[in-house]
Image: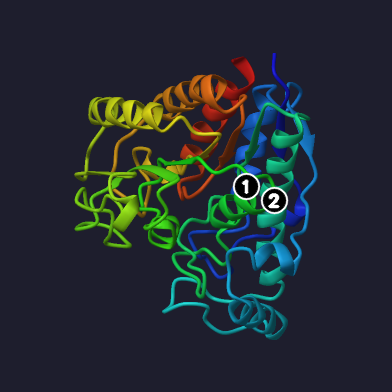
């Protein structure tokens, strides 16, 4: 079996918002309890969180925004966007642990210390270069893509997003990047935040045709997923990526309180298995998985353990 690194720890668990916010600090524990119950923890290489440096954060984010987060974090109050993403004491350090853990996983994949890696408390795909959005302070996916290019010379990157919400912070910040292939399955933006990700959004300029948005209607379940995934898989194969990133948001599972899709954990497992095979064919196995959203704790535990089981069993 290939070595799979799994990032879990107190520093990652602190990424969450207070006062009954849907993105609470209990999300990591909900996953970890189920992973331990299934014995998956014993099969993975469990790694401690790692803190990102400012230099690493600024590979994607503007220095002014990073400084603003640091200031509001120290103050312990304020809004980082229009209202979804409040600052809380230590939010800078918690968000930097998300990014740092993802970058540590990326380094392990490139160095050959791991074949695959999973960071459940990550996949914060709404943050833009200069602002927060949708519960996301720093965009670990964006930083990872920028780092893959700047530090490791990996140009062809595939970003795959199963979260119910469109990954706007990745899409728009790389909309004109022809070497970033995006396949994003999500609830139609006419019904759900952030209101973007129409099928007509395929990239801009030289990147036109390198992005595949697959908006699905509320109530779309496993059969709709299967049809959309078949399109995504063919699209990704043609890109021949050197690195594959998967954001496996569990809010697309049936019964999430903030979204309206009806996927099952088997959908996430199917996508994971397909991306393992894709990465083995084109990317020397390099598959980096982040957890993304998910606000029904039982769904989150079931969805993410299905992904982890697929990673461990390949």
Residue farthest to the front, as pictured: 206
Is disc 2 placed on a helix, strand or loop? Answer: loop
- Disc number for residue 148: 1
The local secondary structure at tag 1 comes to: helix
Question: Viewer-proximal residue, 154 or 30?
Answer: 154
Residue at 21% over, 45% down: 218
Percent of width and height locating residue 126: 45, 61
Please give the name of the residue rendered at 42% of the width and 54% of the height, measured from the top-left corner.
Answer: 177
Residue at point 42%, 22% (across, down): 270
Which quadrant of the figure has residue 94? Answer: bottom right
Q: Viewer-proximal residue, 188 or 16?
A: 188
Residue where numbered disc 2 is placed: 151
Pointer 1 with pointer 2, Cβ within 8 A = yes
Label 2: how many residues lie within 10 Å, few (<14), some (14-19) or many (20+)? few
Mark 1 surroundings within 10 Å by alpha-carbon count, few (fewer than 14), some (14 through 19), many (20 or more): many
- Compared with 11, 221 (above or below) is above
Camera sees residue 204: no
């Amino acid at each position: 079996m290939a070595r799979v690194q799994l990032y879990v720890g107190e520093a990652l668990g602190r990424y969450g918002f207070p006062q009954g916010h849907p993105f609470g600090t209990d999300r990591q524990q909900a996953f970890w309890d189920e992973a331990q119950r299934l014995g998956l923890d014993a099969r993975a290489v469990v790694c401690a969180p790692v803190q990102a440096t400012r230099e690493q954060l600024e590979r994607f984010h503007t220095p002014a925004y990073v400084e603003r987060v640091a200031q509001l974090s120290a103050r312990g109050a304020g809004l980082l966007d229009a209202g979804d993403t409040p600052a809380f004491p230590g939010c800078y350090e918690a968000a930097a642990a998300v990014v740092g853990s993802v970058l540590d996983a990326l380094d392990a994949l490139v160095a050959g210390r791991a074949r695959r890696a999973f960071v459940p408390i990550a996949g914060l795909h709404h943050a833009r270069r200069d602002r927060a959005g949708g519960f996301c302070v720093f965009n670990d996916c964006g930083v990872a893509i920028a780092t893959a290019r700047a530090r490791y010379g990996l140009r062809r990157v595939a970003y795959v997003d199963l979260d119910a919400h469109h990954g706007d912070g990745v899409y728009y910040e790389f909309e004109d990047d022809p070497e970033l292939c995006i396949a994003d399955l999500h609830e139609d933006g006419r019904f759900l935040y952030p209101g973007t990700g129409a099928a007509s959004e395929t990239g801009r300029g030289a990147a036109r045709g390198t992005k595949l948005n697959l908006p699905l209607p509320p109530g779309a379940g496993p059969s709709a997923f299967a049809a959309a995934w078949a399109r995504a898989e063919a699209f990704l194969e043609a890109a021949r990526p050197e690195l594959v990133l998967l954001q496996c948001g569990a809010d697309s599972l049936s019964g999430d309180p903030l979204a309206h899709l009806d996927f099952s954990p088997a959908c996430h497992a199917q996508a994971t298995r397909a991306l393992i095979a894709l990465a083995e064919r084109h990317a020397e196995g390099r598959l980096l998985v982040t957890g993304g959203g998910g606000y029904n704790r039982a769904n989150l535990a079931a969805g993410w353990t299905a992904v982890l089981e697929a990673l461990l069993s390949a």
